[in-house]
Each structure stands twice: as structure tokens, then as C-alpha cells.
Image: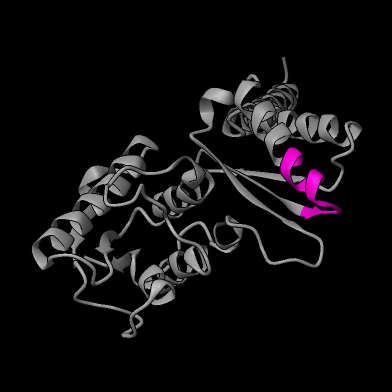
Amino acid sequence: MSEVSKRRMRRVAAGVGVAAGVCGALLALALMSVAGMGGAPAAKGWVKDVTAGLAERGYDWIQIDIADSIATVSGAAPDVDSLKYGFEAAETELQRGPHAGEISLVVDATHLEGGPLGVGAALAALGAAPEPAACQDAFRATLDGRSINFAPGSADLTDDNRRLLDALSAVTLRCKAYRVEIGGHTDASGFAAANMALSEARAGAVRSYLVARGVAVEALEVRGYGAGVPIDARRGPAADARNRRIEFTVSAS
């Protein structure tokens, strides 16, 4: 074989090798892309199916977002019945779907058209890695005009707290980079020592609820203030109701 023929064969072989290498690299990248999606398309499809099913039942105003194992149900309902039953229907579907085990909380951010924002609206507006000030604002907004209720004279949470406490739990989970103080406050009725003990017990009950929803216990601090830090210095049923409260304080350390 001549030297020219040998050189031609070597060039052909080199070209085949380069082509095979390129094809192999492209195949590897394609496989890496599929693996890197981590099932995200399936999860999106599942949420889309749930939303479509709700729309067929008349709840076409509902939107669902899932992040960090928290499902936020939002949207403006056309009437009171739709507001009540729409969220309940969405919660049921999310908790029984094929990905239900990946969801730790379902938060209600729905509201009535033209009405005030829902209890979970602050969570829906909170980013993936919020600053401490944003977390503090989210706690304030979630509790604005709302109270965590207890049985009179006790630290027993009443049954009407669930949606509010779930929203607060979700904010705490989203703000897991920071410590959160749960502060209990009472009105000025009764003895100071009893009020101090009651305020701490109520804050402890809220902490127990949040921990049951997945919040790390070491991220939470409980403190009772008794009647020592009133927000309304007057006396009377309205002032006492404002002073009986739970507050959340975020700190970076």
C-alpha cells in the first residue's frame, strides 16, 4: 500500500473516531438532562391534572403551587361557597394523589373576589430564600387581623386554628435559616404569676403544633410575657382581646 493510501486511511479512521465521540457526548448529555430533571415533568403533570379536575368541578379559579414540600392553593373565588369548598376539594385531592407523600402542608391562600387576601397570601409572596425582614413581614401579615385561639384560661388550641397555624408553620419552614421566637401574651386579668405561666404554656402549645408540621424544634424558642407587654393599655373586652395574642419574632442567629 502506498504512503498516500495509508495517510487517507488514517484520516478516515480519525474522522470516524471524532464522529463517534461527538455522538457519545451528545447521548451522555441527553441522559444527564433527563436524569437531572428528577421527575419534575411528572410532578408538574400531576399538579396540572389536579387543577384540571378541580376546574371540571367548577373550581376553575384555583391555582396550585408546590415548593419545598408545601402546596399553596390560591385564587379568587366568585362566591362564599366556592371559597369554602374549593380549598377543601383541592386539599383532599392533594392529600390523596400519587405524590401526596411529598407534601407536608397544604396552605390556604384563596380569597373572595374583591375581599381581603387569604391567610396564606404572605407565604405565596415569600421567595425561596427570604431575608429575615421578609420573614418577619410574612408573620405579621399572616397574623394581621387574626388570632390564634385557645380555650378560656387554658393552653388548649381550639379547632378553628388549623388554617392559620398551617400557614404559620409554612412560613416558619420557608424561613428555616433563622431562629423564631414564639411569644405568648395575656391580658391583665388575674394574677401576674398565673398570667406568666399561661402565656408560656400557650406559646409552647403553638410550638408543639409547628413541630408536628415538620418545623425543627431547635429553630423555635418559647417565651411567656404575661401581661407585661400590652398593645392596648386600656381595659375592657376589646382591649383585653387585642392583648391576648401570640407573636413571632425572627432573628438571624
Q: Is 81 contained in the magenta span? A: yes
Residue farthest toward the top in the current orientation of the protein: 1
Residue located 75% across and 22% down the image = 5
Q: Measuring from the top left, give residue 118's x and y in whole percent.
A: 64, 58
The residues colored magenta run 76-86
Query: In what quadrant of the picture does the N terminus appear?
Result: top right
Query: In what quadrant of the picture does the C terminus appear?
Result: bottom left
Q: Measuring from the top left, give residue 64's x and y in whole percent.
A: 70, 43
Instruction: Decide if residue 90 is on the left or right side of residue 182.
Output: right
Q: Measuring from the top left, give residue 238's x and y in whole percent.
A: 44, 74
Q: Is residue 207 visible?
A: yes
Q: Is residue 222 visible?
A: no
Q: Nearer the viewer, residue 235 or 81?
A: 235
Q: Nearer the viewer, residue 199 or 11?
A: 199
* 3 w.r.t. 159: above or below: above
* 239 w.r.t. 50: above or below: below
Figure quadrant of residue 87: top right
Q: Main secondary structure of the magenta part?
A: helix
Residue located 53% across and 61% down the image = 127
Q: Nearer the viewer, residue 173 or 90?
A: 90
Residue farthest toward the bottom in the current orientation of the protein: 233
Residue located 72% across and 28% down the image = 46
